[in-house]
Amino acid sequence: MNTFRKVEIIEFEFIYNSWMINDFPENELKKLDHIKEIFKQGKYECIVMEEDGQIKAYACFLWLKPTVKILDYLAVVSDTRGKGYGSQLLNWLKESKGKSEIIVESEDPNFTVDDKEKIIRERRISFYEKNGLIKREFSLKLSEVEFNILTFEDSQLDKKMLLNEMLAIYSEFSPILKVTPY
């Protein structure tokens, strides 16, 4: 049976050092001290999905107001990929998000010169769409990387509200990040 739970900062450090440093490229991974500071402010959380007491997948969120959260990281533990754990975690998030809007950024496949990377990006977006998220009517360039923006189908955020919420979060936690809608 699968269980879902929030982890405390000590367990998050274990997840970061055990999996996140391998699951995400160095240029995409925030420094642990930076995340811990946001965690201590009560504006960061990590949810894990466990099966038989073993972590199979995790999702980390960042926010200014708990009603609008950006999915900061989502991954399935490497030796358990391809078994549906990511879909199960997204489904649980969709069903249990309560009054929180969840925003997902996924690298835009139209902005890569590498065919292999384009396929990976297209598969990632397809995965999100298969699990109830939809691409929104705008995308964002964050510093030098273009991202499609997705939300669950039942999102109540219109384009202006969504953009304003995202800009506020970036301004607070990544003030040097250059954000350009397109």
Image (spheres, grey):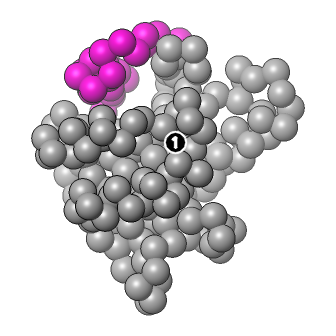
**Residue placed furthest toward the left:** 41
Percent x, y of residue 96: 29, 64
The type of residue carrying mark 1 is Ile
Which region shows up in magenta? 154-182
| Towards the viewer: 70 or 138 | 70
Count of picture labels = 1
Q: Which residue is mark 1?
A: 134
For label 1, count other residues whose C-alpha is less than 10 Å away and answer few (under 14), some (14-19) or many (20+). Answer: many
- In the figure, is residue 55 to the left or right of 154? right
User: Is residue 85 shown above or below 113?
Assistant: below
Q: Residue at x 39, y 36 (%)?
A: 31
| Towards the viewer: 163 or 23 | 23
Residue 180 painted magenta: yes
Q: Residue at x 45, y 74 (%)?
A: 55
- In the figure, is residue 157 to the left or right of 119? left
| Towards the viewer: 99 or 47 | 47
Q: Residue at x 36, y 42 (%)?
A: 32
Hey, which quadrant is residue 85 in on the image?
bottom right
Residue 92 appears in the figure: no
Q: Residue at x 16, y 37 (%)?
A: 65
